[in-house]
Image (spheres, rainbow, N blue to C red):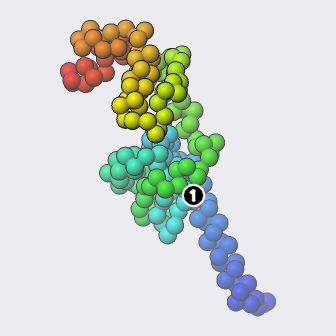
Amino acid sequence: MAFHSLNHVLGSLENQYKQQHQKQFQQVLGHWQTVVGAVVAAQTRPTSIQRGVLKVATSSSAWAQNLVFERQRILEKLNQVLPRSLTDIRFSTAQWAEIPLATFPGEQDQRELWQSHPSRLPGAAIPHPTPAASPSDTPLLAFQNWSMVVRSRTKHLPRCPQCHSPTPAGELERWQVCSLCAAKHW
């Protein structure tokens, strides 16, 4: 029987521990979109597991806050597919910008969802603001510039039959009115 130094034994245990955590994190990544759905997966990215707590980056603080309410349900679903249970999930916007989009599995689904959204203006060219208003100008000039850009974007849109505001054609096809009038009806 060969004896090993304490450093060798502890190093071996540490490697096993790291491999288990890395394997569990890879499993979380593999199941994330299935567990939370394509829309939520498009706005979130798991970043790490520390002491049984999954850390998830979100695209905005609104997403982080809403997902806190869904945390228990997501945790239950994840624990059903993982060999080692997680104890909690923490949502934060802190690491969102640091994670490259190429690592995000739901990016294509999010693009397809946006392409078919009824409020999308297909092929609409977005005019650039005129250099008449710069950040150092007055708020009134900035507002007038913004107003001009919005008017130029919407002048060729059909009108909502109820409120007569410019409305994307997709909204009229789907609800026969603009999204604001449709929401009021619901």
Position above or below: 110 against 183:
below
Position above or below: 145 against 92:
above
Q: Residue at x 31, y 21 (%)?
A: 179
The image shows residue 94 at horizontal and vertical percentages of 49, 56
**Amino acid type assigned to the residue bearing label 1 in the image:** Phe
Can you say which quadrant of the picture contains the C terminus?
Answer: top left
- Around disc 1, counting alpha carbons within 10 Å, would you say few (fewer than 14), some (14 to 19), or many (20 or more)? some
In front: 78, or 53?
A: 53
Q: Residue at x 42, y 20 (%)?
A: 148
Left or right side of 1 for 121? left
Left or right side of 164 for 64? right
The image shows residue 86 at horizontal and vertical percentages of 46, 62
Q: Residue at x 69, y 80 (%)?
A: 11
Position above or below: 13 against 38:
below
Residue sticking out furthest to the left = 185
Instruction: Give the secondary structure at mark 1.
Output: helix
Q: Residue at x 26, y 8 (%)?
A: 161
Which residue bears the numbered disc 1?
25
The image shows residue 146 at horizontal and vertical percentages of 41, 27
Total count of labels = 1
In front: 95, or 164?
A: 164
Residue sticking out furthest to the right = 2
Position above or below: 55 against 38:
below
Can you say which quadrant of the picture contains the N terminus?
Answer: bottom right
The image shows residue 96 at horizontal and vertical percentages of 52, 50
Residue 98 visible in the picture: yes
Q: Toward which corner of the image does residue 123 lie, by quadrant?
A: top right
Residue 81 visible in the picture: no
In front: 4, or 94?
A: 94
Left or right side of 145 for 162? left
